[in-house]
Image (tube, helix red, strand yellow):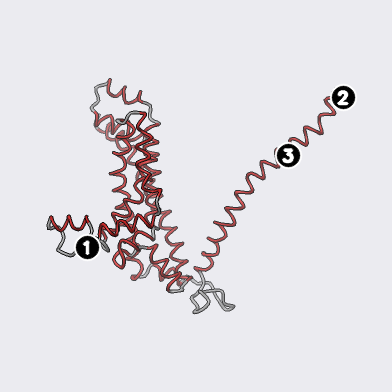
Amino acid sequence: MSISAAANIPAMARRNWTETSLGWLVVLVPFTVYLAFFIAPVMVIALQSLTPYAVGQHGGLADDARLTLENYASVFSVTFRSVFADSLSNALMGTVLCLLIGYPVAYFISARVPERLKPWCLVLIIVPFWTSYLLRMLGWRILLGANGEISGLLQAMHLLAPGQGLLFTQAAVQLGLVYNFLPMMILPIYVSIEKLSRDHRDASRDLYARPWQTFLSITLPLTYPGIMAGLTVVFIMMTGDYVTPELMGGAKGMMIGTLIYSQFLQGGNWPLASAMSLSLVFVLVAAVLAMTGIGALLQRLPETIRRATR
């Protein structure tokens, strides 16, 4: 080894040590933030959910507090079980509606709109969401009220009684959920369709496949990742939504997010609210896993049908 090469060894070691330290720093900083602002609060809520309710103590930091599962038993009692069921059914229905509306929109923008106009179409989809979430809901409250334009039109069509509005109904809650989360379904599906190679669809047409056969055999299975991304995000956010059912449904729009809010800030029963929050997480994880499994089966369904009909 030459003298110059030997002299460069300490410099190389320092440079390697610096790069390694920077690499660990890049990893540790976000991990620390994640630990401090997500994992730690969740652990506090988990501990809170296992403590009994004590008036004035928000449940559970008293010296004689003991761990118990009573709060989880209360969560799934008859009183609250119906709210959980309604929340999941509303979220499931809203997610399906978003998919049925969002997929054709995303497909139309990707396959039928000229390239120069596609960015403008995407802008039109997200422009309403440049305003406040609260302002948008207040605007819908005006439209769906007894004197609003939409309710007035339905009254003129004799679909609503005079002086009756859609506000504070399950239909209003469903409309608000779909309106607020539809872009989160359209955008991932649009991206997945844009990534498709046109060669697959052209080959399908060259083999005299009909348009619906091309769609079911080529387009739909290959856009499965975008569909699952949209379904997962929309379903999770709809289930835990608080503002929409509170403003659009009132007492008739009670969902689990509203119930958790009322227990935390109005009832002061923090242990029960914490148990509800964690129960919601467990239910959502189970629901997402089930949706993923069902989606995988549906993705393989066209191929299974083809094999069975040969």
User: Splitting the image into 4 quarters, where does residue 253 fall?
Assistant: bottom left
In the depicted view, which residue is nearer to us: 153 or 91? 153
Q: Position of residue 260 (x, y in %)?
A: 42, 66
> Mark 2 to mark 1: distance in Å?
90 Å
Depth-wise, is mark 1 or mark 3 nearer the camera? Answer: 1
In the depicted view, which residue is nearer to us: 282 or 7? 7
Q: Position of residue 94 (x, y in %)?
A: 31, 52
Q: Amino acid at mark 3?
A: Thr
Q: Looking at the image, is 98 positioned above or below residue 264?
A: above
Residue 3 is marked as: 2
Residue 146 is marked as: 1
Q: Which residue is mark 3?
A: 18
Kindly state the secondary structure of the residue where label 3 is placed.
helix
Q: Residues within 10 Å of mark 3 (few under 14, many from 20)?
A: few
Q: Residues within 10 Å of mark 2 (few under 14, many from 20)?
A: few
Q: Earlier in the sequence, mark 3 or mark 2?
A: 2
Q: Position of residue 13 (x, y in %)?
A: 78, 35
Q: Amino acid at mark 2?
A: Ile
Q: Amino acid at mark 1?
A: Ala
User: Splitting the image into 4 quarters, where does residue 168 fall?
Assistant: bottom left
Position of 77 with respect to 21 (left or right) is: left
Position of 309 with respect to 42 (left or right) is: left
- Residue at left offset 30%, top offset 38%: 301
> Mark 1 to mark 3: distance in Å?
68 Å
